[in-house]
Image: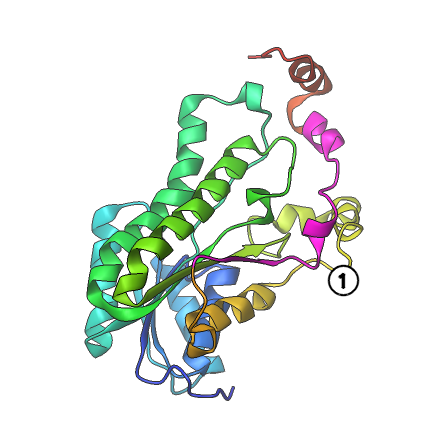
Amino acid sequence: MSGNNALAGKTAFVTGGAGGIGSNCAKLLLRDGAAVLIMGRRKDALEKTKAWLLESVPNGKVEIHAGDACEEKDVRAGLDKAFAMQGRLDIIVPTVGGGGFKPLLMLDADTFRAELNVNIISAFLAVRYGVPMMEGGSIVCISSTAATLPFAYLPAYHTSKGGLENFVRAAAEELGSAGVRVNAVRPGLTRSDATGPMFASPDILDRFVAEFPLGRAGEPEDIAEAVRYLAGPESSWVTGQSFAVDGGNEIRKNPDLSDMIALMFGQEALDTVKRGKSPV
């Protein structure tokens, strides 16, 4: 897998590195010359991903670090290990995130707070403790079309991704003087472990694709290409932005998945929340 060597000598830190988006981001960063540390909670998954990366980029420099992207000590240890690879840190790609469908009036504070933690705090920790190691560089967060495009029954995820994009703007404003650029990629429905059930259901997938002018759902490579652009010198005058990579979904709408929610929680519960009442 040949690259353009634009990132030669640079070091990148990628959280969620064994996931579909994280691993493909790491592959493109490696392809173009960066040394990469991938971090994730499962060492076995990281080791498999490292082997896959080195098959794709045989001369690549890859290290792994097992840890939780929402835990300060784990993030700091991972960043230290990334910095030690070449005595520098240039690129941070915090890909950890996620959420689940659940009506607002069925959520509790702990569940809501947990999604804020995984989608915002995971990025905050990487930025907070990574930037002091950098001498300029680029940070690329992973948002979602849910940050801006209404989608019923995803209130915690909506809130957390919207908060992440505001964090990106705030960080870009403050860190520009240090030569650090901060941006985000905003994927539409993209194949991953988390979205696997949607891809496995032709009915659900077809409803999404009907709202994509380009006629297909996303693949991890689609997102990784945008991350690579924002991570590299090609985007040297870009900061504080969130780029939709969504097949055009944002110019349309999200599908109605009320029937799926009814199957998950029961029609009676769904009817109750639609009346503004709590079923629990």
Residue 52 visible in the current orientation:
no
Q: In which quarter of the image is residue 34?
A: bottom left
Residue 208 belongs to magenta span: no
Residue 24 visible in the current orientation:
yes
Q: Where is residue 174 in the image (x, y as percent from the top left)?
A: 30, 54
What residue is pinned by disc 1?
A: 214
The image shows residue 83, relative to residue 129, as above or below, that is below
Q: Where is residue 252 in the image (x, y as percent from the top left)?
A: 75, 48
The image shows residue 233, relative to residue 191, as above or below, that is below
Q: Which residue is drawn at 49% across and 44% down?
A: 98
63 or 232: nearer the eye? 232
Residue 256 belongs to magenta span: yes
Query: Which region shows up in magenta?
Result: 240-263
What's the residue type where badge 1 is placed?
Answer: Leu
Query: In the picture provided, is 148 more to the left or to the right than 237?
Result: right
The C terminus sits in image quarter = top right
